[in-house]
């Protein structure tokens, strides 16, 4: 399962393409965009955001992930069907569960499947409880074609889980489904090149940055020792978009600020061992977008980001990074240049 050349699970490079314009897309479904995501950054964002707006965003997170995974699983099922390989529901769920450790999400052990009704399973070493609950529900919904509810007995990282098909969709679910179906068109401008592994096709930089331990369901960034997941970006993006629609543009600034804070801490631990240029090159490798420094003038920086996975997410990370690596405080001005491109100016 592991690539003998680079050590990354073979499926990663075989199923995904690193495009020169800053995105990672599925080889068979180019509207499914993937990203490498720092798990503690997500935890930090959700908890700080809940504190700041005085509203627990956990349920939104679960809903977004549920719809995101429903969308993903349906696509996958459709793909198998087209190839005349549609499996029975139980084997399909088992196949799906076998992917979870590969992308760092955790271990799912299916105990019992009552077709069309429920699934009992055990979850271990999971990365994020609300997201994992949404994900499990979404998978079951795609297979049984009914809305599902999850009962979880355990703690934030493991549990005995019962997922039951109930059939009824609620308002929040419908709302999220609309968000998930939005696929931002990609701008095909950019010339990021990768040296690809001859064994599996994944960029060699990926295996230099990350250690993939499928037995532990763990993707660990070698330098920071932080846990990452390699996941579909739609769920994370839908949460941010719904919050912004519901609570107004101000919440975008709040998210940027929270992510700037996180980013400062993250890059602080790397000071001295990296440079701004080196870090900018990681944005497309992680699927966050292609960041280009257009101008550096009197200590001010002007960037263009092509295909940002979500503007506030990229802006916050870049902001904190620049401040830490350049040891200065900056103000940020962001403008949307056109669909799929943002301009960011950091001034002192
Ligand atoms: Zn390889």
Image (cartoon, grey):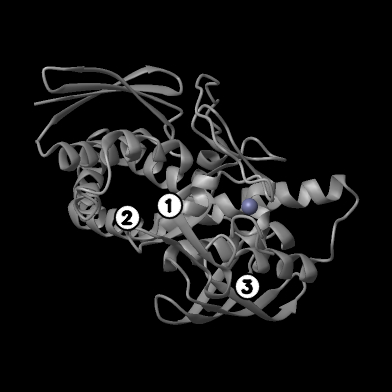
Q: Mark 3: few, some, or many residues within 10 Å (few <14, many ≥20)? A: many
Label 1: which residue? 37
Contact? badges 2 and 3 (CB < 8 Å) = no
Q: Name the residue nearer the viewer: 201 or 153.
A: 201
Label 3: which residue? 164
Residue at the image position 27 percent from the left and 60 percent from the top: 47
Residue 101 picture location, percent across and down:
58, 67
Contact? badges 2 and 1 (CB < 8 Å) = yes
Residue 122 picture location, percent across and down:
58, 81
Vertical comparison of 286 with 182: above or below: below
Tell me which label, 2 or 3, sits earlier in the chain: 2
Residue 145 visible to an observer of this rendering: no
Residue at the image position 63 percent from the left and 72 percent from the top: 164
Vertical comparison of 303 with 15: above or below: above
Q: Mark 1: few, some, or many residues within 10 Å (few <14, many ≥20)? A: some
Q: Kindly state the secondary structure of the residue where label 1 is placed.
A: strand
Q: Mark 2: few, some, or many residues within 10 Å (few <14, many ≥20)? A: some
Residue 9 picture location, percent across and down:
63, 59
Q: On the picture, is 98 further left or further right than 283?
A: right
Q: Which mark is residue 41?
A: 2
Q: Which mark is residue 91?
A: none
């Amino acid at each position: 399962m592991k690539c003998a050349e680079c050590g990354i699970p073979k499926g990663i490079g075989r199923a995904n393409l690193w495009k020169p314009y800053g995105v990672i897309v599925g080889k068979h479904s180019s509207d499914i965009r993937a990203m490498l995501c720092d798990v503690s950054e997500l935890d930090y964002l959700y908890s700080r955001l809940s504190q700041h707006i005085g509203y627990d965003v956990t349920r939104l997170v679960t809903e977004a992930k549920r719809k995101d995974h429903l969308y993903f699983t349906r696509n996958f099922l459709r793909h198998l069907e087209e190839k005349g390989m549609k499996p029975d529901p139980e084997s399909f769920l088992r196949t799906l569960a076998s992917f979870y450790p590969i992308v760092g999400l955790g271990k799912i052990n299916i105990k019992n499947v009552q077709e069309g009704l429920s699934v009992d399973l055990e979850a271990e070493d999971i990365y994020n409880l609300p997201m994992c609950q949404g994900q499990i529900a979404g998978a079951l919904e795609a297979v049984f074609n009914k809305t599902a509810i999850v009962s979880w007995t355990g703690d934030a990282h493991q549990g005995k889980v019962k997922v039951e098909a109930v059939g009824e969709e609620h308002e929040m679910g419908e709302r999220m489904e609309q968000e998930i179906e939005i696929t931002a068109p990609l701008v095909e401008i950019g010339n990021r090149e990768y040296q690809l592994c001859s064994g599996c096709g994944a960029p060699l930089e990926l295996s230099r940055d990350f250690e993939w331990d499928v037995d532990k369901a763990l993707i660990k960034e070698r330098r920071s020792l932080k846990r990452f997941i390699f996941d579909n970006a739609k769920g994370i993006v839908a949460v941010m978009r719904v919050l912004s629609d519901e609570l107004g543009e101000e919440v975008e600034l709040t998210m940027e600020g929270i992510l700037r804070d996180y980013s400062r801490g993250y890059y602080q631990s790397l000071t001295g061992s990296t440079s701004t240029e080196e870090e900018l090159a990681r944005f497309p490798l992680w699927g966050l977008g292609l960041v280009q420094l257009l101008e550096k003038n009197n200590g001010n920086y002007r960037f263009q980001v092509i295909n940002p996975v979500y503007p506030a997410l990229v802006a916050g990370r870049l902001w904190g990074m620049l401040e830490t690596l350049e040891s200065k405080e900056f103000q940020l001005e962001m403008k949307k240049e056109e669909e799929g491109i943002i301009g960011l100016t950091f001034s002192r």
